[in-house]
Amino acid sequence: MQGVPMNCLPEPVERLLRLYRAALDAADPSKVVPPHLPAPPAGRTVVVGMGKAAAAMAEAVEAHWHGPLSGVVVVPPGAGRLLRHIRVMEGSHPVPDEYSVAAGNALLAAVSNLTPADLVLALISGGGSSLSAVPASGLDLTDKQKVTRHLLRAGASIAEINIVRRHLSAIKGGRLAARAHPARVVTLVISDVPGDDPASVASGPTLGDSSTCADALALLKRYRLDDMPWLRKGLAGGAWESVFPNDPRLRGNICQVIATGALGLEAAAREATAAGWHCPQLADAMEGEAREMAKAQAGIVLSVAERSQPFAAPCVLISGGEATVTLRGLGRGGRNTEFTLALAMALEARPSSARVWGLSAGTDGLDGTSGAAGAWFGPETLSRARSLGIDPRAHLDTNDSASLFDAIGGLIHTGPTFTNINDFRAILVEALP
């Protein structure tokens, strides 16, 4: 991870950033990949990977592998590494582009014409769904772009988006592993999804999919994206069914989830405890609209501050998972900056004598269109914004949270972290005076 700026920050924020960095360190590919590497095969070893951590995972493989390697991994711009044997390609996130299609085709080519003596080592992390995109037969890139943009703007969950993606793809939903048959496939996953279902990470290119075309069609109807007749026809007829878990081409393959949001929270809690702070973990897989999640956590904070329930102050409340944002405006921000602003506003609406500090940041280092990993707030955040003529309510209503935090120096900049275990939230409730 690149260094989180620590200069001129309030001491409570520095505390919270140390917990965030502990969570990132726990999911460092150089630490979590080597213990899970399989034995080399009799034949070739082909590495394929996709996602924000894929290049760093491949670097860890190269450093610890005994024998020849080849293959390709796909990452977003800025997340590459200098590798000796494995090709690094770039795609687009969160909406696929022509580079994503080229990368997807390169992955399919890498696993073609293999034998039972060969091994495919698949390195999968969050973000891979858009980074490698090969449209299903009868679709083109513009179709996939339209669907992805619509679902993102509508606030669909990542699980819902990935169900649709798996059924509009020629590489996801187990299709990459089916192409690799009869080679054995070992998949290592760094999970960025609530619940850590490996088939949901990067839309499961090497894992069987239990969802159906009917499920994808129902989601398109729910989010009012059923105005594309060729899309309805392909799904209604089952033409784009993905590879089911019991498909014989997947027999003998192995999948291991090697890093999760829970792992990061446990590391952060250990860091806090070592520093003498009480650090309850609320949950590792929270989901929902960012501003609604903020209201719920504000209620817990106020209960702690006013009644010492369910925990006594001082304490640091940590949580993980992934919020969603339904776009109502064209501002700059992401789910973490929106959560942080909404939390600060919810706490201001019910004043307490306790002082509260908090942060929310993506563990990949990038939060939506914010240009940052996330943001932090303190007792003076909203008053500082207003002193500059900034209306917090207007910025929240137009999804422009990052602009507010940028103006007052509240953004958290990390650059690419080369891992991705979803979002990290920490709230410090100081003791009553």
Image (cartoon, rainbow, N blue to C red):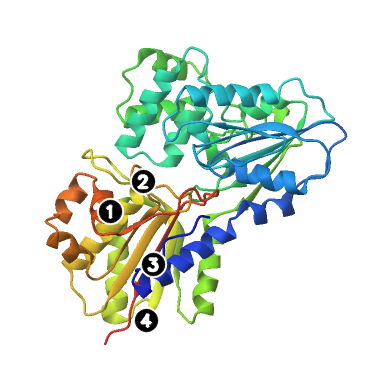
* Extreme residue toward the bottom, this view: 433
Q: Determine whether label 3 and label 4 are within 8 Å by CB.
A: no
Identify which residue, 30 or 139, lies in the foreground.
30
Q: Quadrant of the C terminus?
A: bottom left
In this view, the mark in front (3 or 4)? 3
Sequence-wise first label, 2 or 3: 3
Relative to 292, 64 lies left or right = right
Q: Determine whether label 2 and label 1 are within 8 Å by CB.
A: yes
Q: Which residue is mark 2?
A: 371
Relative to 93, 124 lies left or right = right
Q: Identify the mark at residue 406; answer none if there is no mark.
A: 1
In this view, the mark in front (1 or 3)? 3
Sequence-wise first label, 4 or 1: 4
Q: Residues within 10 Å of mark 1 (few under 14, many from 20)?
A: some
Q: Which residue is mark 3?
A: 7
Relative to 250, 394 lies left or right = left
Q: Residues within 10 Å of mark 3 (few under 14, many from 20)?
A: few
